Image (cartoon, helix red, strand yellow):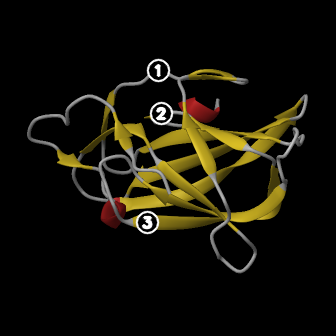
Amino acid sequence: MTSAGGGAAPTVGVALCRAGVLRLSFLGGRAAAGHGELGFSLRNTGTTPCSTGGYPGILFLDRSGAPLPTTPRHTTDDFFGHVALGRLAIPPGASFSFRLGVSQVAGPGAGCRTAYGLQVIAPDDTQTMRVGLPAGTSECGTTTVSPVAPGSGAFG
């Protein structure tokens, strides 16, 4: 699992968005020219605003929930466009998102695997959360990870 982070300093006086007040959801996926895009949201279920920014840590999971080899690469620009890196203030009940870009065509020496779940560490946190990928997703190498964006903006 990669470590999270990579953003600006936390907002002064606002708690960090941590797993205890976040609900992870799978937004869906789409594909184009051998590339898949998966979107995820994290909702602030707390009663106060929280602050976050940077990149989540990720780990693909097999059907039984066991870890799969995962090679993430943090990027603001991927096959599906640009997501700005910055700090976010998330009001209670609001969400932020990130996306993964997966290669669905194996290159030389790359083995494809099907992931049925994702383990996530929110930026600024160390606790894990898990979400299912109901139809499974094929992953054949390095996975790009976008920084978090407000709402579903990373998966828009």
Q: Which residue is pictured at 46% across the width and 46% down the height?
A: 56
Q: Nearer the viewer, residue 134 or 142?
A: 142
Q: How packed is label 3: few (under 14 Cα within 10 Å), some, or many (20 or more)?
A: some
What's under tag 3, amino acid-wise? Thr
Residue 148 visible? The answer is: yes
Q: Which residue is mark 2?
A: 147
Q: Is residue 108 left or right of residue 44?
A: right
Give the x, y percent position of residue 5. Answer: 35, 41
Q: Give the residue at x 26% y 28%.
A: 8
**Mark 3 vs mark 1: which is more N-terminal?**
1
What residue type is disc 2 on?
Pro
* Numbered badge on residue 128: 3
On-image quarter of the C terminus: top right
Q: Residue at x 55, y 30 (%)?
A: 153
Classed neighbour count for the residue bearing mark 2: other residues with Cα under 10 Å, few (<14), some (14–19), many (≥20): many
Q: Residue furthest bottom?
A: 64
- Tell me if label 1 and label 2 are in contact, CB under 8 Å: yes
Residue located beneath label 1 in the image: 84
Distance between the alpha carbons at the discs numbered 2 and 3 = 17 Å
Question: Which residue is depicted at the point 85% across and 37% down?
Answer: 31
Question: Secondary structure under badge 1?
Answer: loop
Residue 7: where, in percent of width, then height?
32, 31
Q: Is residue 93 left or right of residue 74?
A: left
Q: Residues within 10 Å of mark 1 (few under 14, many from 20)?
A: some
Q: Position of residue 136 (x, y in %)?
A: 81, 61
Marking on residue 112: none
- Choose the circle earlier in sequence order: 1 or 2: 1
Q: Earlier in the sequence, mark 2 or mark 3?
A: 3
Question: Residue 135: horizontal and vertical position, in percent?
Answer: 83, 62
**Local secondary structure at mark 3:** strand
Asked whether disc 3 touches disc 1, contact meaning CB atoms under 8 Å apart, the reply is no
Could you say whether the residue bearing mark 2 is in a helix, strand or loop?
loop
